[in-house]
Amino acid sequence: MPTLATTVDGLKLPNPFVIGSGPPGTNLNVIAKAFKEGWGAVIAKTISLDSSKVINVTPRYAKLMGQDGSEVVGWENIELISDRPFKIWLDEFKKCKDMFPSGVLIASIMEEYRKDAWVEIVERCQEAGVDGFELNFSCPHGLPERKMGSAMGQDCDILTEVCGWVMAASRKPVWAKMTPNITHIEEPSRAALSAGCQGISAINTIRCVMGINLETLRPEPSVEGYSTPGGYSCKAVRPIALRMVMEIATMMAKEFPGRSLSGIGGVESGRDAAQFILVGADTVQVCTGVMKSGYECVQPMQEELLAFMEQHRFNTLSDFKGKSLPYFTTHFDLVQKQAQRKAAQKAAMQKKVVTSDAEWSGDSFVQQSNALSRE
Ligand SMILES: Cc1cc2nc3c(=O)[nH]c(=O)nc-3n(C[C@H](O)[C@H](O)[C@H](O)COP(=O)(O)O)c2cc1C
């Protein structure tokens, strides 16, 4: 019987399904619900020291429906980080660890470009008992206007410096969460790992405009008639997320073997999770999927991943982690491989051409006849 249990950076997870930072981990009530439903770990909604600067608008989500209008395939949000006071969060982290001592609780943190702020947020969260940190270098809207989030994640020098501050202060594993709004996601990933982070999480949302209302001619989601580009998530982003996780995993295998990778973006099923693990992820995070289907979705996800493992006789996640990576290559190499295969086929065909009657064979009689026929 295969097992989904896994140990990542010393954290013992009953399964690789992790609540991704966002509404599904936004207060103690919902975090408790996640642990009760059996999620492998919870990454809480991103917090900062001063929540008074965080002011959200409504509406802040917009959905892209599939062709028959019944399925949500894409989701835009212009939601900021948590608007709840830091002190309340610390209290809830403590309560959560009392309620679920073995539950893996990870704080997602974000601060301005100031060493004292990053050190303070790390120290106070770890005193409250969290098991690890995820550094949000990736929120694409609102926060970059304050030089936070993806504004930091796109600047490798700043990122190295900030990760260095965090690593000096943290006694817990640290994952750096990457923005996809960059051409080469390996570069900020490399910067964070060089600074000592234990792992990488990827991806956060992709900067987008959900659509334009053809009656009002205004962009959506519309707030007082105006909008701003937001972050795109849900199953529509999965191919992009898979590509980026594959690129990071390929770089990590060469340069940082043994570091961890958490795959995020459009995971809604066990088979989606299997694909992220096959391209090198240790865990998968789910955010929009929980907003669509509820916390209970972790049960069918686990069953489906186990069924996939049984089908291939994999006993543990590490039996198939990264197993598809060797099958990625360059386009140039694809052309060469195809030319080699065609040349080999042609040579084999030529071998079958009978040059004297003594060469006719009972086993390949039909092929030999065909080889002597007009095309
Ligand atoms: C409404 C909403 C709020 C989010 N808030 C945060 C956040 O506070 N911090 C963060 O790191 N990511 C946040 N995310 C990004 C998700 O954690 C995740 O990286 C992204 O949505 C892709 O995964 P998904 O398709 O499973 O949602 C948010 C996503 C959504 C949809």
Image: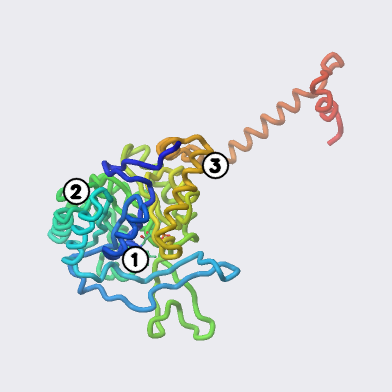
| Residue 334 coordinates in the image, percent (x, y) | 57, 40
In the image, residue 167 sits, relative to residue 45, either above or below, namely: above
**Mark-to-mark CA distance, 2 and 3:** 41 Å
**2 or 3: tag closer to the N-terminus:** 2
Direction from residue 27 to residue 295 in the image, left or right: right
**3 or 1: tag closer to the N-terminus:** 1
| Residue 19 coordinates in the image, percent (x, y) | 35, 56
Which residue is nearer to you in this view: 247 or 336?
Answer: 247
Foreground disc of the pair 3, 1? 1
Q: Say what secondary structure mark 1 lies in.
A: helix
**Mark-to-mark CA distance, 1 and 2:** 27 Å
Disc 1 designates what residue?
23
Residue 332 has which mark?
A: 3
Q: Is mark 1 within 8 Å of ligand 1?
A: yes
| Residue 297 coordinates in the image, percent (x, y) | 44, 57
Q: At 20% across and 62% down in the image, what residue appears?
A: 113
Direction from residue 18 to residue 129 in the image, left or right: left
Q: At 59% across and 36% down in the image, what residue appears?
A: 337
Q: Residues within 10 Å of mark 2 (few under 14, many from 20)?
A: some
Q: At 36% across and 37% down in the image, what residue appears?
A: 254
**Mark-to-mark CA distance, 3 and 1:** 44 Å
Disc 2 designates what residue?
167
Q: Residues within 10 Å of mark 1 (few under 14, many from 20)?
A: many
In the image, residue 351 sits, relative to residue 326, either above or below, namely: above
Q: Are marks 3 and 1 in contact (CB under 8 Å)?
A: no
Q: Check disc 3 and give the amino acid type.
A: Phe
